[in-house]
């Protein structure tokens, strides 16, 4: 059994989508970050960076294993099951480069844009301009990649796609409303979003946590 600590955000949904794809049994522990539950000492013992997602795999080799950081969790679950990440060779590294691109680039830039263009009490044009330029650039990089291959890692659907789905969907809807300039001509990204959005496991994972 796996315990998933999560909330209704794109980073949390990466893990629920993968768990649904894998069909692994898991229980959900919602961590309401709007109520500062991420600072609860019991959660910090598992996730010292006070951010969701985190997991505990109670059946890990050698005893229960806790993990935080979505990229580490996705890689761990993919390796544990032998699915959605090649075990070796170029296909593995293509997937991991796009996974790291998402975790270090797309996610943080869209997250900052969401704050400055949406939730911030004061609208700062310099910050909004900086992060919308980066968002537009990153979506353009994604468009170039997906115009050349069906999935981010190449021919197959992998954890790189799973990591990017909820963030890109958010960029195409809520963020695009707040900062329309980020969404240019992106037909390959739109095709990819539609393909992933049709997967039942993606739909189920996007509904976690049920709060
Ligand atoms: N690099 C982390 C980012 C996780 C993250 O930013 N989580 C947000 C929700 S999407 C969070 O828990 N924020 C709470 C806080 O910052 O206190 C990962 O990929 O797991």
Image: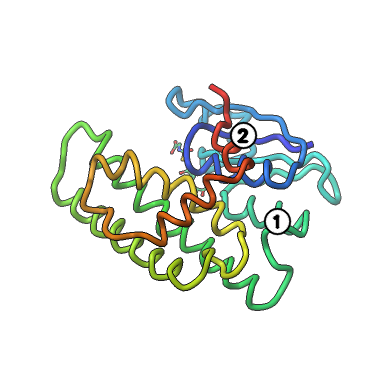
Sequence-wise, the earlier of marks 1 and 2 is 2
Total count of labels: 2
**Within 10 Å of the Cα at label 1, are there few (<14), some (14-19), or many (20+) other Cα atoms?**
many
Q: In which image quadrant can residue 55 be found?
A: top right
Where residue 123 appears, as percent x and y from the top left, is: 16, 39
- Report the residue marked by disc 2: 5
- Residue 64 lies in quadrant: top right
Q: Nearer the viewer, residue 38 or 13?
A: 13
Residue displayed at 35% across by 49% down: 110
Which image quarter holds the N terminus? top right
Q: Residue furthest right?
A: 62
Whether residue 103 sits left or right of residue 110 in the image: it is right
Q: Which residue is found at the position 49% from the left and 53% from the top?
A: 164
Q: Farthest left residue?
A: 125
Residue 6 place in picture, x, y as percent:
57, 34
Residue at the far bottom in the pictured view = 90
Residue position for label 1 = 78
What secondary structure is marked by label 1? helix
Q: Which mark is residue 22?
A: none
What residue is shown at x 45% (from left), y 59% (from top)? Answer: 104
Q: Residues within 10 Å of mark 2 (few under 14, many from 20)?
A: many
- Horizontally, is 74 left or right of 26 in the view? left
The percent coordinates of residue 200 (x first, y second) are: 62, 41
Q: Which label lies toward us, 1 or 2?
A: 1
In the depicted structure, whether residue 130 falls above or below residue 86 = above
Is the residue 40 above or below the residue 79 in the image?
above
- How far apart marks 1 and 2 lie (CA) works out to 18 Å
Residue 65 shown left or right of residue 92 in the figure: right
Please, what secondary structure does the residue beneath circle 2 have? strand
């Amino acid at each position: 059994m796996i315990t998933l600590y999560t909330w209704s955000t794109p980073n949390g949904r990466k893990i629920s989508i993968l768990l649904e794809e894998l069909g692994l049994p898991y229980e959900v522990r919602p961590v309401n970050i709007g109520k500062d539950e991420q600072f609860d000492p019991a959660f910090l013992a598992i996730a010292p960076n006070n951010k969701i997602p985190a997991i505990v795999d109670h059946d890990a080799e050698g005893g229960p294993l806790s993990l935080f950081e979505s990229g580490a969790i996705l890689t761990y679950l993919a390796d544990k099951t032998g699915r959605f990440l090649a075990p070796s060779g170029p296909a593995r590294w293509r997937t991991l480069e796009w996974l790291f691109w998402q975790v270090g680039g797309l996610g943080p830039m869209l997250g900052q844009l969401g704050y400055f263009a949406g939730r911030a009490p004061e609208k700062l044009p310099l910050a909004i301009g900086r992060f919308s330029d980066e968002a537009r650039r990153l979506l353009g990089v994604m468009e170039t990649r997906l115009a050349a291959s069906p999935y981010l890692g190449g021919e197959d659907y992998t954890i790189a796609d799973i990591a990017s789905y909820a963030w890109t969907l958010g960029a195409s809807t809520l963020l695009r409303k707040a900062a329309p300039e980020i969404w240019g001509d992106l037909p390959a990204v739109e095709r990819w979003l539609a393909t992933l959005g049709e997967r039942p496991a993606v739909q189920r994972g996007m509904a976690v946590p049920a709060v």
